[in-house]
Image: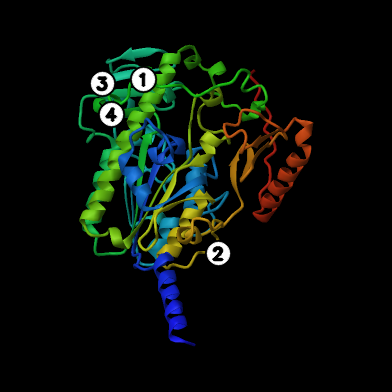
Amino acid sequence: MNRLSLLWKLAALVWCLCSTPAFSKEIKNVLFLISDDLKASVLGCYGDKICKTPHIDKLASEGMVFNHAYCQATWCQPSRQSFMYSRYRGNKGTNFGEHFKNNGFFSARAGKIYHMRVPGDIIDGTDGGDVPSTWTEKYNLSGREAHTPGDYACLNLNIFTTEEEDRQSTRMPHRMFVTVQYDGDGSDQPDHKSASKAIELLQKHKDERFFLAVGFVRPHYPMVAPRQYFEKYDWEKIDLPEVIENDIRDIPKIGRPATMNSNNSIGKYPDNQKRMWEGYYASTTFMDDQVGRVINELERLGLRDSTAIVFTSDHGYHLGEHTFWQKSTMHEEVSRVPLIVSAPGFSPGRSDSFAELMDIYPTCSDLAGLEIPDSVQGKSLVPVLKNPQAKVRDAVLTLDSGFGLRSERWTLLKYNDGSEELYDMLNDPAQFHNLAPNPEYAQKLEENRKALSEKLKEFGLSFDRPKKAKSKK
C-alpha cells in the first residue's frame, strides 16, 4: 500500500469517527420532563408561529426532535401507565423508575407522572394513581387551580367573574373550559412548585446517579397562569382551526367526543373559542418557563454533559378541530405528541421516524447502559439518535375505543363496534375526508386492516366488545 493511499484511508477513518454520533460521553443521569394535554403542533419547534416556548425550543435545538411521535392511549391514566411500563395495556413487569432504582439510581418524581385527577388531586395534594415502587422519593405539589383568586372565566357558559364562589372545579361538568388569569409571579402554582422541588433535588443529589421525573400539569384545564402570560396573546387576533362544512358527517359516532360543538355550548361563542386558545397558549408558555428553570439549574450544576433529557406529553388535545374539544379521540391532534431527546454524545437533529411513548423507557435504559427488561414492548430509539434517517418501526399504534394505526401514508382508525376511518395523510393531513366508505379505496382499506391485524396479533391485543347503553329508567 503506497503512502498516499494510506493517508486517504486514515483521513476517511478520522472523518467517519468524527461525523458519526456515538456514546462519546458517559450518560449517568436521566431527566424526564412531561407536560399534560400538550399537543405537538402548539410548540414553536413544531411549527407554531404564535405560542412562545423558548426553553423547549432551545432544548429541541440541542436534541433530536421526533416529528412523528404518538401516544398509546388518548387520556391520562392509560397513557401514563403505558409509557411507565412500556406496554400497550396493563402493568406487567418492572416500571420505568423502579428499573433505574433497582440499578442503583436515586429515583424521584416532582408532580404528576402517573395519573392524577386534575384539578382534584392537585388541590388536595394527593397521590392519585401513583405507584410507590417507582420512587426513592415522591412529591405532590398542590395549587388552588380554578379557585386561584383572579379573573375567572368559564368559557362555554360565557361566565366572567372575580368572585371565588361557584367556580367549576373537581368533577363538575364544565371545568374543562375554565381559565384564570391573576396578578402574581406564579410561585403559588403547582408547575412552579414542581420545578422548584426538582431544582432542590438536583442540588441535593448531584453527586449520585439519578432518574428525576418532573410532571407539569399545564396546559391541562383549568388553564391558570399569571396575567403577564395571558398578555402575551391577543385572543382577538387568534385564528380558529379550519372546519369544513359537514366535517363530522363521515366520522362514526363512536369516534366523536362528547365535548364537540353540537353537544357543547362553547359552539355558540366563537370569541370564547379564541379565548380557549389564549388560555392554552398562556398556560403552555408558563409551563415552558418552568422547564427552563429546571434545565438551567442542571446546566449551572455542571450536569448537562452527563444527563439525558427527555421532554414529551401524555397525549395531545383538540381545540376546535372538527368542532372537537379535549382528548379521547384517535385523531392526529390527540394521538401525536411532542418528543425531544437530548443526550450527551449525540448530534442534534430532526427525524421523521416513527416513535411511540412506550419507547422512552427502553431508550433511557439503553442510554444509561442498563439492560432492557423482557416485559418491555417499546423499542430503543438510540439508532435514531445516531442517525435521524434510521427506523425502528414502520407504524405506530394508539388505543382508545378501538385501535389507530398510523403509517407513513395512511391512518386507519378501527373501532370496537366495527366502524372505521381511513385517511390519506399525504394529501389530507388534517383528516377531513374519511376514505373508508369510498369503494375506490377498498384495496388500501384492506391493506391497512391486514397491517393492523398483524400488529394486534404480535402483541396479543384484541378489540373490546362494545358495551350496551345503560337504561335511563
Q: Closer to the observer: label 2 or label 4?
A: 4
Q: Amino acid type of disc 1? A: Trp
Q: Which residue is tagged 4?
A: 229
Q: Residues within 10 Å of mark 3 (few under 14, many from 20)?
A: many
Q: Position of residue 369 (x, y in %)?
A: 42, 68
Task: Find the distance from the CA under tag 2 to the CA under tag 3.
Answer: 51 Å
Question: Would you place residue 271 above or below residue 94 in this image?
Answer: above
Q: Secondary structure at mark 3?
A: loop
The label shown at residue 374 is 2
Q: Closer to the observer: label 2 or label 1?
A: 1
Mark 1 or mark 4: which comes first in sequence? Answer: 4
Q: Position of residue 266 (x, y in %)?
A: 47, 16
Task: Find the distance from the CA under tag 2 to the CA under tag 1.
Answer: 50 Å
Q: Secondary structure at mark 2?
A: loop
Q: Residue at image x 54%, y 33%?
A: 328
Q: Are marks 3 and 1 in contact (CB under 8 Å)?
A: no
Question: Would you place residue 124 above or below residue 235 in this image?
Answer: below
Task: Find the distance from the CA under tag 2 to the CA under tag 4.
Answer: 45 Å
Task: Find the distance from the CA under tag 1 to the CA under tag 4.
Answer: 12 Å
Q: Which residue is tagged 3?
A: 150
Q: Closer to the observer: label 3 or label 4?
A: 4
Mark 2 or mark 3: which comes first in sequence? Answer: 3
- Left or right of 296: which side holds 425? right
Q: Quadrant of the C terminus?
A: top right
Where is residue 35, by image quadrant? Answer: top left
Mark 3 or mark 1: which comes first in sequence? Answer: 3
Q: Closer to the observer: label 1 or label 4?
A: 1
Q: Amino acid type of disc 4? A: Tyr
Mark 2 or mark 4: which comes first in sequence? Answer: 4
Q: Secondary structure at mark 1?
A: helix
Where is residue 446, by image quadrant? Answer: top right
Q: Which residue is tagged 1?
A: 235
